Image (cartoon, helix red, strand yellow):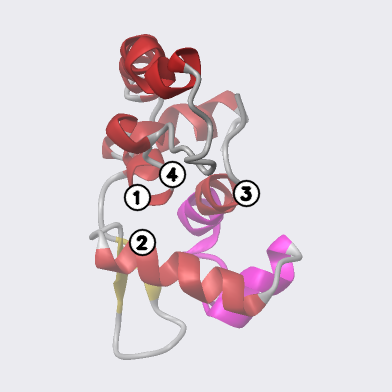
Amino acid sequence: MKVSRRFQLTVQTVLFIAVYSDKKEMTCENISKEMKCNPVVIKNILNILCKNNFLTKGSSISNIRLKRNIKDITLWDIYKITDEVDINNIFCSDDSQIASPIVSDLPELLSPAFGEIMNSMKDILSTVSVDSLLKKYNY
């Protein structure tokens, strides 16, 4: 199982802002330069974070700050706004010409297992806060 690049970059962005918002000018351009990422991608991530009440932007462009305490932001919180999967739509048939009963019943067969996987993933990711990640690396 893979997590998307968007999830990874969002976690990196939150960590970066948590560590450097008091030390560096927090602009989209500066964040993207430090993270070696396209500014448009970072701008989109910042917009997602703002829309979901993770960030606050002051009157100045360079006043991007975390709105929530780093102890209260979990990996599950970030996953939900970037990658959350709708189990009901996880299996879609791109080829409606296939008449095999196994193929047509595949969503019903696999959805319960994937639902359990997602619940386990939620349980584990909910225990990992941004604060715990930073402490792990002595920040």
Give the answer, above or below, for where 13 lies relative to 83: below
State yes or no: residue 54 in magenta: no
Label for residue 49? 2
| Residue 121 in sight from this viewpoint | no
Q: Disc 2 or 4, which lies upstream in sequence?
A: 2
Under tag 2, what secondary structure?
Answer: helix
The answer to which of 103 and 36 lies nearer the viewer is 103
Q: Is 60 on the left-hand or right-hand side of 67?
A: right
Give the answer, above or below, for where 104 lies relative to 120: below
Residue 124 at x, y percent in the picture = 39, 16
**On the image, numbered disc 4 is attached to which residue?**
83
What amino acid is labelled 1 in the image? Ile
Residue 93 at x, y percent in the picture = 47, 37
Residue extent of the magenta highlight:
13-35
What amino acid is labelled 3 in the image? Arg
Measure the alpha-carbon separation of dots 3 and 1.
Answer: 13 Å
Could you tell me which quadrant the N terminus lies in? Answer: top right
Q: Residues within 10 Å of mark 4 (few under 14, many from 20)?
A: some
Measure the alpha-carbon separation of dots 3 and 4.
Answer: 10 Å
Measure the alpha-carbon separation of dots 2 and 3.
Answer: 15 Å
Q: Is 73 on the left-hand or right-hand side of 29?
A: left
> Dominant secondary structure of the magenta stretch?
helix
Label for residue 81? 1
Measure the alpha-carbon separation of dots 2 and 4.
Answer: 13 Å
Residue 26 at x, y percent in the picture = 51, 74
Q: Disc 3 or 1, which lies upstream in sequence?
A: 3
Measure the alpha-carbon separation of dots 2 and 1.
Answer: 8 Å
Q: Residue at x 27, y 67 (%)?
A: 51
What amino acid is labelled 2 in the image? Leu
Label for residue 5? 3
Q: Disc 3 or 4, which lies upstream in sequence?
A: 3
